[in-house]
Image (cartoon, rainbow, N blue to C red):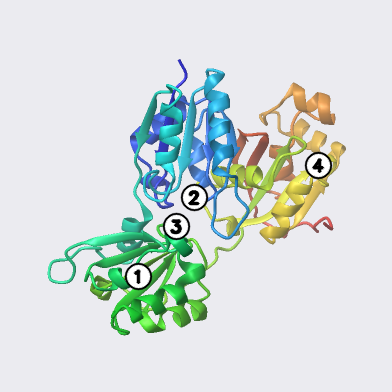
């Protein structure tokens, strides 16, 4: 019988994924992944599993919830096991309850695998406990995304004396803070905003409540960001803007092969899994065979990440493969492109004198490999 898992991937750091989640991902036939999930978790997915990107991110186009449920049911009714992978915890602003009920209504067994929610992890990442004796005896998790009839009663929340943890509130933060101040919350109440918590790109600001919107604007913080309001915020280890992490010197080349029609998300996910926690800024260039240089998703991926795209001819790729017999080969690639491999030879060709760091990795229609880059990059192909 087919089965389903609703899995929380945690706040971002792949090492915060639970052991139970890893086991479920290794068993699933199909994985539906949200946009806010760190793509590094896909390293735990079966190589032959189908990965579907059903991104849901505030302020961006997203897959309708009804379509996500319908997709899950289609695969489950075809007797495929399905893992639904969400950022944080599926039952904390993750609409996991809706998916659970929809599947239970048709008799599908569902296991919920909880993850660490950002409302706990983000404050903790900068030293803020959401409860602390003498400062706050409780915390309230609330969404800032709703408006109109579903608007939280900010006046009532202002009077609780408890820590407020606001998810998805960046686009309406000035309105929310104005309502809290009108409800009697002091303008100098300690507050903070934490962006990309637990990831290398994490940044934050801390400021009195009335000054928080301007502090966020000055720092250039963007979603996904958690806002914390209350006296516990005074315990933040380093008040103010966290120092930016210095961008690493690019030392790697990313070789890519892909089937026609792949998406930018599929390419990004494969690249991040291959990087294994290294940032995209460590990549100097993306390399592929000339026949793949016009793939729109590949070109967009390079533009979005400010990465030069370099290409190599069939003859150059064939020569590299001939010179390095240990590189991975594929008869399907040979039939399609006239060479038995793309990602590994292209990564090496783009790194003259370099060595293969990450061998061929296949994920959801994309193959990637990484080589070290000891010398000057080749001239990019115009996009």
Residue 202 is situated, as x and y percent measured from the top left of the image, at 44, 64
**Mark 2 vs 4: CB contact within 8 A:** no
Residue found 73% across the figure and 59% down from its top: 303
250 above or below 206?
above
Pick the front one: 281 or 264: 264
- Looking at the rendered image, the quarter that the N terminus falls into is top left
The mark nearer the N terminus, 1 or 4, is 1
147 above or below 63?
below
Instruction: Give the structural element (helix, strand or loop) at label 4.
Output: helix
- Residue pointed to by mark 2: 277
Instruction: Give the structural element (helix, strand or loop) at label 3.
Output: loop
Q: Nearer the viewer, mark 2 or mark 1?
A: 1
* CA–CA distance in space, label 2 to label 1: 39 Å
Q: Nearer the viewer, mark 2 or mark 3?
A: 3
Q: Going by the image, does 175 lie left or right of 345?
A: left
What label does residue 154 carry, if any?
A: 1
The mark nearer the N terminus, 3 or 4, is 3
- Would you call the spot at circle 2 few (<14 residues within 10 Å), some (14-19), or many (20 or more)? some
Q: Going by the image, does 146 lie left or right of 233?
A: right
Q: Work out which residue is located at the far left of the displayed protein and give it.
A: 134
Instruction: Give the structural element (helix, strand or loop) at label 2.
Output: loop
**Mark 3 vs 4: CB contact within 8 A:** no
Report how many numbered discs are placed on residues in the image.
Answer: 4
What label does residue 292 carry, if any?
A: 4
The mark nearer the N terminus, 2 or 4, is 2
The mark nearer the N terminus, 2 or 3, is 3
* CA–CA distance in space, label 1 to label 3: 30 Å
* CA–CA distance in space, label 3 to label 4: 32 Å
Pick the front one: 192 or 322: 192
- Looking at the rendered image, the quarter that the C terminus falls into is bottom right
Whether residue 259 is visible: yes
């Amino acid at each position: 019988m087919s089965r389903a898992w609703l899995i929380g991937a945690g706040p971002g750091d792949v090492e915060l994924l639970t052991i139970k989640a890893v086991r479920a991902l290794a068993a699933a036939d199909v994985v539906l992944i949200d946009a806010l999930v760190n793509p590094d978790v896909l390293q735990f997915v079966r190589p032959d599993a189908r990965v579907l990107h059903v991104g849901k991110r505030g302020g961006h186009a997203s897959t309708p919830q009804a379509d996500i449920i319908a997709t899950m049911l289609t695969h489950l009714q075809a007797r495929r096991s399905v893992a639904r992978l969400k950022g944080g915890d599926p039952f904390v602003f993750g609409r996991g309850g809706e998916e659970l009920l929809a599947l239970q209504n048709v008799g599908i067994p569902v296991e919920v695998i909880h993850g660490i929610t950002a409302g706990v992890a983000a404050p903790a990442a900068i030293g803020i406990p959401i409860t602390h004796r003498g400062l706050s005896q409780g915390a309230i998790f609330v969404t800032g995304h709703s408006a109109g009839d579903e608007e939280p009663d900010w006046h009532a929340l202002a009077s609780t004396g408890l820590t407020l943890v606001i998810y998805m509130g960046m686009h309406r933060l000035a309105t929310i803070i104005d309502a809290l101040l009108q409800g009697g919350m002091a303008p100098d109440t300690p507050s903070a905003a934490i962006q990309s918590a637990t990831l290398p790109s994490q940044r934050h600001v801390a400021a009195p409540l009335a000054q928080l919107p301007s502090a966020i604007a000055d720092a250039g913080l963007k979603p996904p960001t958690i806002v914390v309001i209350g006296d516990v915020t005074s315990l933040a280890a380093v008040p103010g803007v966290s120092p930016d992490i210095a961008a690493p010197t690019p030392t790697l080349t990313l070789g890519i092969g892909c089937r026609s029609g792949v998406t930018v998300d599929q390419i990004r996910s494969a690249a991040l899994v291959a990087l294994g926690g290294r940032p995209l800024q460590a990549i100097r260039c993306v390399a592929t065979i000339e026949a793949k240089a016009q793939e729109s998703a590949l070109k967009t991926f390079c533009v979005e990440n400010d990465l030069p795209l370099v290409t190599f001819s069939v003859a150059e790729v064939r020569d590299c493969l001939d010179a390095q017999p240990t590189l991975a080969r594929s008869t399907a690639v040979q039939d399609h492109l006239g060479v038995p491999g793309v990602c590994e030879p292209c990564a090496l060709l783009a790194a003259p004198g370099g060595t293969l760091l990450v061998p061929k990795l296949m994920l959801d229609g994309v193959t990637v490999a990484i080589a070290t880059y000891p010398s000057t990059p080749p001239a990019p192909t115009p996009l």
